[in-house]
Amino acid sequence: MKQTGLLKSMKLCSRYKKMNEAEKEKVRQERLHRMVLWAKENSPYYAELYKNVDSGFSLTDLPPVSKVELMARFDEWVTDRKVRLSDINEFMKDPDNIGRKFMGRYLVFTTSGSTGNPLVALCDGTANNMMSAINAGRSIARREDLKDFLLRGGKTIGVFATGGFYLGNSSVRARLFAMPWKKRQIAVTSALLPVPEIVRQLNEFLPALLGGYPSNLELLIDEQKTGRLNIHPVLIMTGGEYLSEDVRKRLSAAFGCYVQTSYSCTEGGTIACECTEQHFHINDDWVIVEPVDKNNIAVPDGVQSDKILLTNLFNFAQPFIRYEVTDRVIMHREPCACGSSSPWLTLEGRTDDVVSFTGNGKTIRVAPLPLYATLKEVHELRRFQLVAQEGNKIELRLEPADGTDMNAAFVKAKDALQAFLLTQQVTDTEISLSEEPPKQHDKSGKFKHIINLNK
């Protein structure tokens, strides 16, 4: 399929906003039918799944799919017959390949999400250009912030997990490979570093836009208030976790700027952009969001769902069509004061926990992301869950990878975790192997990788 370039992607996004509702609906239906036809013709998995789906289908005629099902049949799922998951896994063994293109064509991203089951995602040029176009044209809510951001040279730095094929880190590294002259304009500082080192790098870079996970940025509030960190961004953009109103207000007060967030995932890119009313407006020209109950039955507008079914209309390399995402949302179609006519979402607050340790006579707070990223790179693990308890005690709930002994997996995980905690000046920890496997919350069904009981 012919690649859609960045300029055309931006024009398509801009043109859609000027259409009336009838024209928008026509565009959405055309894109859905094009994606389904492409998947049926080029993916053996979808060819089998849609064998009884004719050209006059409606969205609800299409069977929902899950991460576990798709990953189990990865080679049949993707539409490029040359792609093999075993080759991707070999590619990902070399961290220097982060941000480089697999087979010279696809960026590779990994994620676990709220179910704890790993996903490998491929994005070709069209998918990456479309994600870039959506973010460039819609992510900044206020015009004055966009203007000030551009006047400051667009200098952007993100506090992201590095060392793995994560969306934020990999995307930035890919841009720097393609445009090395932009290294003074865009950068990443590793969330795995000790806070003083993150502070040093931010002071050196002096960003106009600061990005990152809320739990990581929260640790920088005191650094800015004490003057150890001295930066003056025009905007803070969070993502990847729920941004609480308390953290939003404290970030805004400490840094003296507007703070906003977005609703994104690796499978769908930026699903919804936050407006000035703090409503998440769906990018409904490129993604379809269906709030449903546990049985995949649609829930009415204004009612909280048990999950959503997500359809990506731009990733032809790896179609996500009515794909289960375990996020609980409320759909709204009433008018928004910001002027956008797109439907908007209310999101359930969900995040892993910040963990508190003691070391050198002081409390050391560690964000969940670097703990997750450290254990994520222990390839002997299929799933994991860290439970922090009083007295620097850590319980690891583990599920080893196929062919790996549980005790061997635990030793690898323990060594990696202790090595990371030493970089945070946490020297006295007791790490034990739990008799329980990783598990979701009994009532909500949500999965946390990092649980702090030391509160």
Image (cartoon, rainbow, N blue to C red):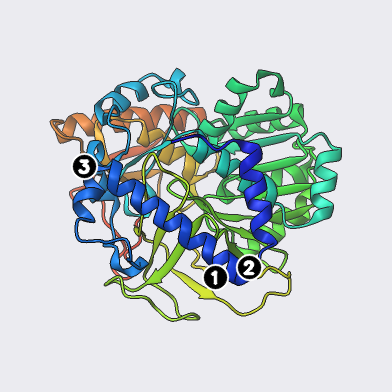
Amino acid marked by disc 3: Arg
Provide residue 174's location: percent of width, then percent of height: 55, 27
Q: CA distance from mark 1 to mark 2?
A: 7 Å
Residue 360 seen: no
Q: Say left or right for 442 vs 209.
A: left
Q: Earlier in the sequence, mark 2 or mark 3?
A: 3
Q: Say left or right for 435 vs 156.
A: left
Amino acid marked by disc 2: His
Q: Which residue is mark 1?
A: 346
Provide residue 454's location: percent of width, then percent of height: 43, 54
Q: Say left or right for 163 vs 228.
A: left
Q: For residue 266, which quarter of the picture?
A: top left
Q: Which residue is mark 2?
A: 279
Q: Does residue 424 lie above or below 143 as drawn?
A: above
Q: Residue at x 29, y 50 (%)?
A: 67
- Residue 73: give its label: 3
Amino acid marked by disc 1: Thr
Q: CA distance from mark 2 to mark 3?
A: 37 Å
Which numbered mark, 2 or 3, is in the foreground of this view? 3
> Mark 3: few, some, or many residues within 10 Å (few <14, many ≥20)?
few
Task: Give the position of the N terminus as an image quadrant.
Answer: top left
> Considering depth in this image, is 63 or 327 the residue closer to the camera?
63
What is the secondary structure assignment of the residue under circle 3? loop
Q: Does residue 105 lie above or below 308 as drawn?
A: above
> Mark 2: few, some, or many residues within 10 Å (few <14, many ≥20)?
many
- Quick check: marks 1 and 2 in contact, CB under 8 Å? yes
What is the secondary structure assignment of the residue under circle 2? loop
Q: Residue at x 82, y 40 (%)?
A: 150
> Mark 1: few, some, or many residues within 10 Å (few <14, many ≥20)?
some
Q: CA distance from mark 1 to mark 3?
A: 33 Å
